[in-house]
Image (cartoon, rainbow, N blue to C red):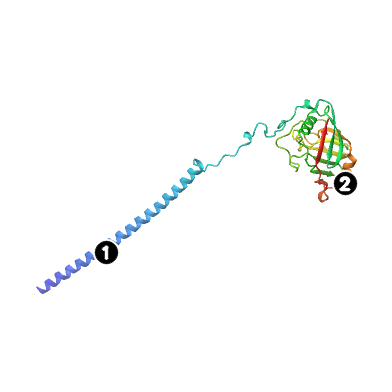
Amino acid sequence: MAGNKSSEREAREARERLRRYNARQAVHENQLARRRRDNILAVVGVVIVAVLAAGTQVFYFTAGPGVPTPAPSASEAPAAEPTAQAGTNVGDVPDPSLSEGRLWTGDLTLNEIALGIELNGVAAPQGVASFVASSQSGYYLGKTCHRLVLSASAGLIQCGSFDGTGASDPTFSFGPIENPAVDGIYPAGTIALARGGNDGFSQGRQFFIVFQDATLPDDSAGGYTIIGRVTSGLDELLAQIASAGIVDGLEDGAPVVPTSITSLTIQ
């Protein structure tokens, strides 16, 4: 009997140990499963947050208040200031009839140098009309003569830039070229309109005065519109401004003597 009881006790203890082992295994497996589930949920949560953040940004910058204000295009420019195109006038260009088809006389003062001038409204009605209108509006007063050229082929001074740098005025230009020089030779005293290269409709309010016979070859657009000539004072211009030379000793650049238009009258 004693042997049977001992065997039964050992069997019960073995079953209990097995039960406890199975219980621990179950707990361990549950913990592993829970960890896997928690990791999966964490990854899914991160992905969802990232997707939501990206979606929010896309909405903000494409349909929400973050949409940038569109910049105006060239086609939206005011009608009075259209984009310059070959063969078209830009801005408030006066009618050629303003030149009255006659000779105009006047006085142009650079610094303290008085120049007598004559404008030919017969040969260059559009160019003269522009110069007269700009003079009457007071445009030229205070404008600088930003460029001096002293070379073997030319001696001239250029004036009338709207910003003092020689840049073209985007709000005012016209064409075509009128009364260009024969064979590209512009005699001393010539007053002509400046323009951009190869563009006969890029003339504006800038002009140049030739104080030493100049040879200026034509480009694909032709020559330069001669609107008139200096009738007196050219020697003084040479003595006071041209003789002082160009900044840095160049052949083409800003004059050493700062020069501006202090007076202009036309009759």
Residue 215 visible somewhere in the drawing: no
Quadrant where the N terminus sits is bottom left
The residue furthest left is 1
Q: Which residue is mark 1?
A: 24
Up/down of 81 relative to 239, above or below: above
Q: Amino acid at mark 2?
A: Ser
Q: Which residue is mark 2?
A: 243
Q: Nearer the viewer, mark 1 or mark 2?
A: 2
Q: Quadrant of residue 145?
A: top right
Number of other residues with Cα within 10 Å of mark 2, as a class: few under 14, some 14 to 19, many 20 or more:
some
* Earlier residue among tags 1 and 2: 1
The spot of residue 137 in percent (x, y) is: 76, 33
Which structural element holds mark 1? helix
Quadrant where the C terminus sits is top right
Query: Going 20% across and 68% down the picture, which residue do you hit?
Result: 14
The spot of residue 224 in percent (x, y) is: 81, 35
The spot of residue 49 in percent (x, y) is: 43, 50
Q: CA distance from mark 1 to mark 2?
A: 109 Å
Of the pair 25 and 96, the residue shown nearer to us: 96
Query: Going 48% across and 46% down the picture, which residue do you hit?
Result: 57
Up/down of 115 relative to 103, above or below: below
